[in-house]
Image (tube, rainbow, N blue to C red):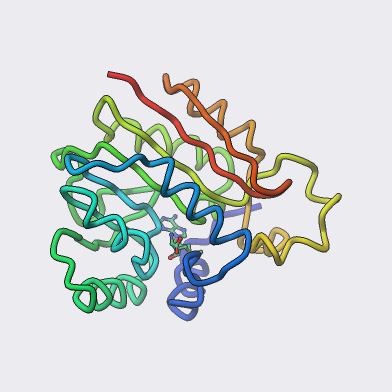
Amino acid sequence: MSYERKRVAERFDELLEGASTLKRGGIVTRVGEVSFEMLRLSREDVLLDVGTGTGAWAIRAAPMCRLVIGIDISRRSLEIAEKNARLHGVSNVIFAAGSFENPCEEMDLHAMGITRVLALYSLHHLPDDMKAEALKNLASILRRPGRMVIGDIMFFEPPEMHVSEFDDVGYDGGTLDFPSTADFLCEVLRALGAEVHTVRLHPLAGVVCGIFHG
Ligand SMILES: C[S@@+](CC[C@H](N)C(=O)[O-])C[C@H]1O[C@@H](n2cnc3c(N)ncnc32)[C@H](O)[C@@H]1O
């Protein structure tokens, strides 16, 4: 199991809107909707959307927040995201190159007052040790009180029991996708000091929300 950033970026440079969880429907979109609700956005919030893709959720969040920053490793997705933001007449969204490994590639996020972090169907491309490191890094950028919401493929049951449903949850079986167990994500967030809530939407997909109190 190894993370191949270049291959992942190339895949999403091709997929573009085809990778949007908002457009996919079924369980994948449901994960997005529940994640979005669990952000509990308010007008004062600054949302960081990691792996924003073509920006559908970032743009949806914009009218509810002070500022939204969407970062991604796919340059082409970011170009489309910017176009989409203009089409929707949204002016408080910034899109920039950035990754879980290095969120601040293009802008220093420490000074942005981030109160919400969303990782929607993006974190599963990293193996577990890199996920833990990335979440630690993101927790250091997040203001208190703050929330971090991960909506993704995550295993509540052994994946071998649900092979025929891999496509329903958008899991490629282990080529570029390396989902962890839901328990692993909860443990990482708890170790960072968060109160953790989990919503299981499918044996292989759900939402984990970390609340970081002030
Ligand atoms: C399935 S798409 C989801 C896009 C969007 N979050 C949504 O829900 O519609 C996954 C996105 O994660 C991005 N991604 C994958 N690995 C990443 C990483 N290490 N850092 C940042 N973004 C990453 C991909 O480029 C892609 O745009």
Q: In this view, does 150 lie above or below 4?
A: above
Q: Position of residue 175 (x, y in %)?
A: 67, 63
Give the left or right position of residue 54, taking residue 151 as reference: left
Report the quarter where the C terminus lies: top left
Q: Where, by quadrant of the figure, is residue 162 drawn?
A: bottom right
Above or below, 86 relative to 191? below
**Residue found at x 50% / y 77%:** 18
Residue found at the very far right of the displayed protein? 161
Residue 24's quadrant in the figure?
Answer: bottom right
Q: Is residue 76 above or below residue 136?
A: below
Q: At 19% across and 60% down in the image, what residue appears?
A: 94
Q: Position of residue 168 (x, y in %)?
A: 70, 64
Q: Where is residue 124 in the image (x, y as percent from the top left)?
A: 56, 51
Q: Nearer the viewer, residue 133 or 165?
A: 165
How many numbered markers are drawn?
Answer: 0
Position in image of residue 78 (x %, y %): 30, 70
Q: Which of 83 and 138 is in front in this view?
A: 83
Q: From the viewer's perspective, tell me whether residue 167 is left or right of residue 150.
A: right
Q: In which quarter of the image is ligand 1?
A: bottom left
Q: Residue at x 36, y 73 (%)?
A: 77
Q: Which residue is drawn at the image coordinates 28% and 75% (left, top)?
A: 84
127 vs 52, left or right, is right
